[in-house]
Image: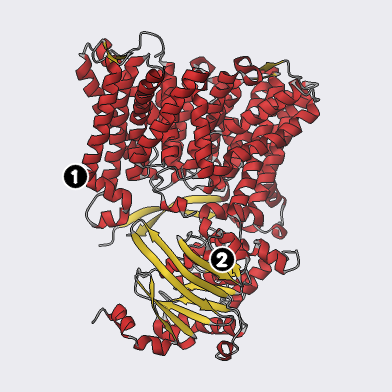
Amino acid sequence: MLEVTLIYGFVNSVILALVALGFSLTFGISGVSNFAYGAMYVLAGYVVWILMHKLAIPFFAAAALSVVLTAGLGAALYWFVLLRVRGMVLSEVIATFGVGLAILELFRYLGFTGFEYTLPSFTDGSIMIGSTYLDYQRVWIVGVGVFLAVGLYFFTHYTKLGLAFRGIAQEEKTALSLGINSDRVAGISVAFGSGLAAVAAILILPRGTISVNEGYDVLINAMAVCIIGGLGSTPGVIVASFIIGYAQMITDTFLGPHWKMIVSLVAILLILVIKPSGLFGKQKELEERM
Amino acid sequence: MVVKRKRKERIDRGIKARSDDIFALTSFREMLYVAVPPVLPVLLLLVLPLVLPLYWKKVLISAAVFALLAMSWDFIAAVGMVSLGQALFFGMGAYTTGVLDHYAGLPIWLSIPLATVIGGFLSAILLLPVIRLRGVYFSMVTLVLPLMIERIIEATALFGGTEGITGIQSFPNQWVEVYLVLVVLLLCLFGFRRLMTSDYGLVLKAVSDNDRAVMSAGINIYWSKAQALFIAGSVGSFCGAYLTHVYMFVGMPAFALDYSILPLASAVVGGMGTFAGSVMGAMILVPLSEALRGVGGLRTVIYAISLVVFIVALPEGIFHYIQRKYHQFERWVEVEG
Amino acid sequence: MVETSQTESPQPLLRVKELSKSFGGVRAVVAVSFDLYPGELLGVIGPNGSGKTTLVNLITGLVKPDAGLVEYQGRNITGWMPYRVARLGIARTFQMVRPFAALPAFKNLIIPLFSPRVRSLSGGKYGDRDSVAKDLLEEVGFERDSSVTYKPAGSLPHGYLKRLELAKCLALRPDLIILDELFSGLSIAELAGILPIIEKLLVGGTTIIMIEHRLRELFRIANRVVVLNYGRVIAQGKPADVMEQPDVKEAYLGTE
């Protein structure tokens, strides 16, 4: 019992982290909160499905193509929509929310619901950890999740583009004067975040069917993790994911699956009362009241 | 060589300049110019129920409800809080009146006002922690809260769970039903417009403009924001309570995304910051969506797309556009450049 | 104005003790202490980035100090919210003037005039805020009945914006005013217009702290000066004496 909770809690936490990583990254770099994030996630799943079933493209090629397409859509979202309303929080929020809504509801309208909309696992079968079965897909999720977290750390600390990302995040004006094109970097960050959403979708979606509502759930979960961890903070995302991930798994085991959502809600309300800027909130202005 | 370019010039109409100060009205035409914009919609709204068939009367009711929700959105947006979850306010009012009616057996003329106040209070309390934060946090939390509450009601089977509460009393007759919401709509419209030009409204707007300066002027901006939330929450809760009695049912759909999106779209399409724009937006979008019943789910897609198009390309909204045409004329002039 | 510092009042109006704040790794203000007596004009000077504005933010509550004490009229106000500090009668200007751009100039004053402090000072009533606002603007040099009073604040020239900023302070009827680089960006002529206003405030018994880069003008009216460098107080005393100190010379001129 305890073993199952521990192992599946870990998997659950990694899933939450994967889902939140892209959202948090985009915000951390460019200050854009991409409310179309959940739509990007679901879109990536459907794109893979369409490529595989309508165009008969093999799974891994379809997956790669889908990540590229979703990232491209993120870039397009930035260039054609966000760039025009940059700096106006109200407009940014409404515009991204509207785009996400349009994508999700379009899929619903086109009838993309049902059991046939599933993605294949990477490899079938399962392994035993102690006395607990763990299927390979979940192993993949954990593996890729850890790889992405570590990879992102090295990317932002040791590559030119990554350093530019961090430069913009910390001091946009100074970065501008050093010859970093903040618009381009911000556009790339939205694309990057969307790409990460696609990666997460391709890893996580094989566990069940792809559904439009998943898009809203993903957005809610991503935001819950980011609010608790502190917007834009990668360590915050990871710590918050593990807190919520395990808390959800514990309530799931002892109270029933319905209560999982309450954990996130209570966690959000608690953190807002105790430390509004989140566990690792880097936002100086929030802590400093202004 | 001087390059000639064309530029659009906007000039106030003579009648606007003459009738700007109320004591300068000298002709019947000027009086009409001033009086028509506020009086015409009032008359229209009050006469419409008399002539509309029952079905379109229901559409008018739902348009009025969404107009109220849109105004409540517009009000807190003016204070710098961008809500993506008017459904929270709506649902709070709906469930409060449902509980008051079902469990306490209160009459309708008590349950609606009580639900309005209690719902507003609960909404404000729930959002209280977020008002300390700037920017996008408020939007996130308001988006997340109603969706989560929906799941929680489902999970805990609270207040009837997925079944909801049925058998809530209805209005005594359809005239009370229609005119109650229309009168509240007009009161809110003129009340809000008046409020925002008062000194109190000025302070509220200043909060979203430069909160540091307002704080340093000795004004507790958190208290101001909480008051604004209570007012907006009450308006939203009234909508919820009202529709609950119209449908004689309250359930999880009270927290549905529809109640967040359509008001937002109405305010943006109609024109933010004017309240009249919100009403105009709702009066256009809701009947339009009825006309588009055939396309079903595509309606939400249309709202979403119009939301994006307006916010990016036409952020002033329809109302400002009409207002400009009414007060000013435009002409192309050549300028040297 | 000199006699105020001689009438040694037993209790300082404002006492700042060992106030510290760091942002990330940067120590913006380090153990700053000074006392301020009623009726004084204290200048706070120092090179750019020496922590002057942070000091103001710490006193007025916009930033929470890591350590230290701020006492006003014997009351510990460390870490109070800005609006509570303002209600005690500490008003401040901002270095970056950011008016409520869409509002007419005089309507900008409605916001401070709406604060509970003003109401309680005028006996529970606000009175006619519009006319009070216009009077205040005249006090800081907006010509009476000229159109500038009614123009949107966003369209005012810099000199008027600075005056408006000062008027916003005065609207609170403060006992202590903190002016954060009020003189910056003003022409000599505009300065000549504002200086008398400040002198008049001093005569009226208001205590003032001035953060300033324009030392010549400051020294003409300041009783005492505190010099900050890298967040620390490196000198304190009469203007003329302070400038003689080698530390200060070094901080300003960068020479050994």
Contact (CB < 8 A) between labels 1 and 2? no
The numbered mark at residue A158 is 1
Q: In terms of depth relative to the viewer, which is nearer, A222 or B178?
A: A222
Under circle 2, the secondary element is: helix
Give the amino acid at mark 1: Tyr
| Circles 1 and 2 on the same chain | no
Question: Label 1 crowding class (10 Å Cα cut-off): few <14, some 14-19, many 20+?
Answer: few
* Lateral position of residue C161 relative to residue B87, left or right: left
* Lateral position of residue A211 relative to residue A74, left or right: right
Chain for disc number 2: C
Q: In which quarter of the image is the N terminus of chain B?
A: bottom left
Q: Nearer the viewer, mark 1 or mark 2?
A: 1
Q: Quadrant of the C terminus of chain B?
A: bottom left
At a point 23% along the width and 18% down the height, the residue shown is A62
Give the amino acid at mark 2: Ala
The numbered mark at residue A134 is none
- The count of marks equals 2
In the rendering, at what x and y percent does residue B284 appear? 57, 30
Q: In this view, does B192 lie above or below B153?
A: below
In the rendering, at what x and y percent does residue C80 appear? 56, 60
